[in-house]
Amino acid sequence: MALIASVVLVGVVLYGIVPGVVKVGGWFELLFVNGCNLPFNTGVVIYIAVLAGALIWATYETFHSKNQSRMRYAFVLTVALLGIPFYGHGTNAIIIGIVIIAGLLIYLSPKIQSKPKFRVSARALNTAVICSMMLVIGYSSYALIVIRSVANPPMDQNSPEDIFTLGDYLGREQYGTRPLFYGPAFSSRVKFAQEGDYLKPVEESSDKKWIRKEKTSPGEKDSYISIPGETSYAYEQNMKRAKYSALKRNIQAAKKNSDAEE
């Protein structure tokens, strides 16, 4: 049971908190830079202040547990600001996040918590909030990456000068991808589509990215623009299908050899 809990916690950190903080911070950055015409990184600074306030508030409420309603809202607000519920990209991430937040509010409601079987103690919530706070403090060391990148050193992979390029850096986008369970195998061929008398490779692109807009004049306001994501070729066979096809060919070849020997 402890092993399963450890795996779940590692998954929450790697696929919940780390990308979630970058994602929610990016939403704040777009709101205050593109929406309010403020300088770059203003939204990130405001997000850090709001997140710190939410963590302190949730720690206080879960420690004293004087008001169950305030404790519940403080905990859910902290989880939302950490970005844990917003799994995925684009609109899907927002929908999934809203559903998870609503489910968490319902689960922590007095009607559900009145049942001993589903009750979550204030001590457990306080422990979760403090652990999240320690994780945020630990990962704050990545601010050094942004500070270093602003100085434009000779080696500056992905140039993480803002929250969006920092997300690419943390996601190790500069190293490409290597499918472990599903994706192109060594024997996979590029997929082609018929266009007239020619065959054209089929391309796939990831979600759009936000980058800083180059200024055309000194007085122009800071802003971000969206560009298409990384483009790659689609393949005829993915890993699972490729293995199944190879196994099928081997079985057919074995049957032919058996028939020939008979």
Image (cartoon, grey):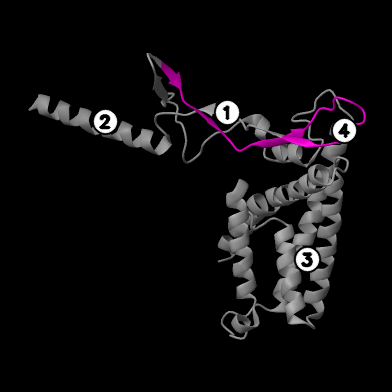
Query: Is residue 3 placed above or below 261 in the rendered structure?
Result: below
Quadrant position of the N terminus in the picture: bottom right
Q: Amino acid at mark 1?
A: Thr
In space, the residues marked 2 and 4 are separated at their CA atoms by 56 Å
Q: Quadrant of residue 152?
A: top right
Q: Mark 2–mark 4 contact, CB under 8 Å? A: no
Q: Amino acid at mark 4?
A: Val
Q: Amino acid at mark 2?
A: Asn
Task: Residue 250: give its label.
Answer: 2
Q: Mark 3–mark 1 contact, CB under 8 Å? A: no
In space, the residues marked 2 and 1 are separated at their CA atoms by 34 Å
Could you tell me which secondary element the residue under label 4 belongs to? helix
Q: Read off the residue under disc 4.
A: 150
Q: Read off the residue under disc 3.
A: 130
Q: Is residue 145 magenta?
A: no
In space, the residues marked 2 and 3 are separated at their CA atoms by 56 Å
In space, the residues marked 3 and 1 are separated at their CA atoms by 41 Å
249 sits left or right of 16 in the view: left
- Magenta stretch: give its range: 199-225
